[in-house]
Amino acid sequence: MFEALEMAPPDPILGITEAFKKDPKPGKINLSIGVYCDENGKTPVFNSVKKAEQRILADEKTKNYVSPNSGTVEYCAAVQGLLFGAGHEAIASKRCATAHTPGGTGALRVAADFIKFLKPDAKVWLSEPTWPNHPSIFAASGIPTAAYPYYDAEGKKLNFGPLLDALKKVPAGDFVLLHGCCHNPTGMDPTVDEWNAIAEVAKAQGWVPLFDFAYQGLADGLAEDARCLTPFVASGREVYVCSSFSKNFGLYNERVGALTLVADSETSAQKALSHLKRIIRTNYSNPPAHGSNIVTTILNDPALRAEWESEVKGMRDRIAGMRQVFVDTLKAKGVKQDFSFLTKQKGMFSFSGLTKAHVDALKEKYGIYIVGSGRINVAGMTPSNMDALGSAIAEVLK
């Protein structure tokens, strides 16, 4: 039966990593996949995570299923507190419903299945460009997608005027996917005023905001990055938030995420949660426990939380520092083009402006792997690979 199959195309990002592993070139550099690396090129385990794990293992008495299958009360409360702040009106009035999911991708898929059930004719609008996996996730749930303008490639900035004009035309009942911070792949985020303007359009038009919030804490700070949610939640209308703790806790292989729905009332939130539980039951039945126990332990312990917040700040500062070093290195290598726009971008990714031809040359000649769009994972840059990286880019730009 399988003989009739054609080989599926490789994932546009994971396929690059597979090719990187097979490349025999010495000194090769992988700047494609969105994984944080420290100054030594390693993806570390947070000290706060290690301490939480030691406590969990010492106290653990069972390997039973997570109950309920939408996540423990403690985990869901910790997620809501991180998103909205302790004592927020939406939490106090119980307008929030949170489901524990396997990573941010799992949250997006549960959201997609829920949207298909709730609004079978709805469309999801995606920024142009967006994370390459977004269209596939919604297509797998049978949801059509459309695009709204986001990035001005010539001006190297957010294309806010056309963005807002496009969102004013999105039909009521459709969903607009918004990157909460550290937009992937461009690194360009709306300002607070621009978020307020987008929220006003959402309220006037009647479309539903769906946030992919995978990088909280890596742009300006944990609370600062969550300000994007404030004007939407304050409106009293529906909001979907897909959280991931892969990056800001370093829990990539533990697959820890959450889908949080904000409704107009406690009754509506509980009705929605009942359907999320049903969707989860027929998908993966129960979420994995270990990662969520780590997140819950850290967020509910003042000392561990302070240490974790310091570690997140260290990540954020290192990424911002490498942006500046990268720009300075290119200038020192004689690159004529102005790359200073990279320092205005936020988070792990930068839309570098490199073309597909540049990307191909970097891979073939120097073993430097970058996504074809020119998106660079700044967190993959280190002091030890910066000179070679700068020299290679200078050569392909000649």
Image: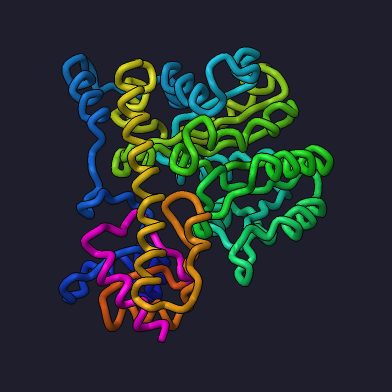
Quadrant of the rendering where the N terminus is positioned: bottom left
Q: Is residue 294 left or right of residue 121?
A: left
Question: Whole-percent x and y of residue 368?
Answer: 30, 72
Q: Quadrant of residue 322?
A: bottom left
Picture residue at 31% right of the left edge, 17% below the top: 303
Pick the residue in front: 86 or 59.
86
Residue 231 to residue 359: above or below: above
User: Which sits in the foreground, 385 or 301?
Assistant: 385
Q: Quadrant of the C terminus?
A: bottom left
Q: Is residue 125 magenta?
A: no
Tell which of 159 and 289 is nearer to you: 159
Instruction: Tell me: residue 141, above or below residue 195.
Output: below
Can residue 353 be seen here?
yes
Magenta span of residues: 373-398
Total labels drawn: 0
Across and down, in percent, residue 369 comes to 33, 70
The picture places residue 54, in percent across and down from the top left corner, at 18, 23
